[in-house]
Amino acid sequence: MTTDSRSTDEAARAAGLEVRPVAGHIGAEIEGVDLAEGLDDAQVAAIRAAVLRWKVVFFRGQRLDHAGHVAFARRFGEPVVLRKRGSASPRDVPEIETTADRLELGGRFGMDHDEWLQRRRHTLLRGWHCDHGARIDPPAATILRAETVPPYGGDTTWSNLAAAYAGLSAPVRDFVDGLRAEHRLGVGYQPRPGDDAYVRHLLDHQVASLHPLVRVHPETGERVLYVNGYYVEQITDLSRAESAAILDMLLDQATRPEYTVRFRWEPGSIAFWDNRATIHLAPSDNAHLGFPRTMHRVMLAGEVPVGVDGKPSEPVTGTEPGRW
Ligand SMILES: [Fe+2]
């Protein structure tokens, strides 16, 4: 597979699709396909090429139901089946996870939504993440479908980590190429005074892995600056102070506006992103508005990341390849 623009365009033409880039480094809208009809092989190849080239692609005005969403996802990989899902998820479609009630997650641990967000936001870049990044084998891709969206607020933003890596100076690229970092669930959470149900939950369900700081993409061969503000705890072999300063710099780089794209959801919108080459920022500007926002997610199983030195990530705790 290639990330070359020309071959991406050729694949799109062959499939009768239009791939319209929407920002300089990341994001393309795909038109000319009704996903509910099912895809032929040329369409699958064109969409796959566009995802690899543009890292996130958007479809608008689609009419997929749960079964159609899963069938679409299966053309690109093996959907993940989570052991635990939120209560809004459809019982009879185990591949789909639905987020509907903004109070649910914090509420499980005795917090309202604002407190839940505040306690988990230890840096301003805290909301940036790849999905399930503390696992040894984070999902390769995520396909998110909007059912109900607020009239304003609730946009999602993605950043291209291959472009962010390429934009570093050569000496810094050389320096970070050989490093690894611990990614851990619950990093930086600020505990409540006294007994904290979420701290107990984290202690019982720890998930952590050592990932290369620069990941070689398994399909494109690109080097990817594999950092995010949500899971990354510490760069291995550096002091705490060195690690904090360098992570700040790398996170600033990873989230520079020129590497990002922001998407305004409508009912029937679908975003399909490469979870190995991007991070995304979940919206935090809509909870106070009180509008409903119902989204359905299917994730595709991913590989164990590999660094520039050819060495794979290592599990630290609570994670095994292929075990969800
Ligand atoms: Fe996410």
Image (cartoon, rainbow, N blue to C red):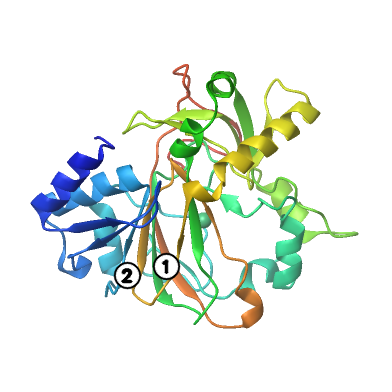
Q: Earlier in the sequence, mark 2 or mark 1?
A: 2
Please state if 88 lies on the left or on the right of 195 as rendered.
left
Find residue 31 and report its horizontal and vertical position in percent. Answer: 22, 64
Q: Residue at x 16, y 51 (%)?
A: 12
Q: Is residue 235 visible?
A: yes
Can you tell which mark lies on residue 283? none
Q: Residue at x 63, y 42 (%)?
A: 252
| Secondary structure category for the residue under label 2 | helix
Three-letter code, disc 1: His
Between marks 2 and 1 in the image, the one whose residue lies nearer the viewer: 1
The correct choice, above or below, for 65 with respect to 217 in the image is below
Can you tell which mark lies on residue 296? 1
Mark 2 packing: few (<14 Cα in 10 Å), some, or many (20+)? some
Mark 1 packing: few (<14 Cα in 10 Å), some, or many (20+)? many
Quarter of image, res 58: bottom left
Q: Nearer the viewer, residue 132 or 198?
A: 132
Q: Residue at x 76, y 59 (%)?
A: 119
Image quadrant occupied by the N terminus: top left
**According to the image, label 2 marks what residue?**
66
Three-letter code, disc 2: His
Q: CB of mark 2 within 8 Å of CB of mark 1? A: yes
Please state if 233 lies on the left or on the right of 302 as rendered.
right
Quarter of image, res 35: bottom left
Find residue 320 and report its horizontal and vertical position in percent. Answer: 50, 36
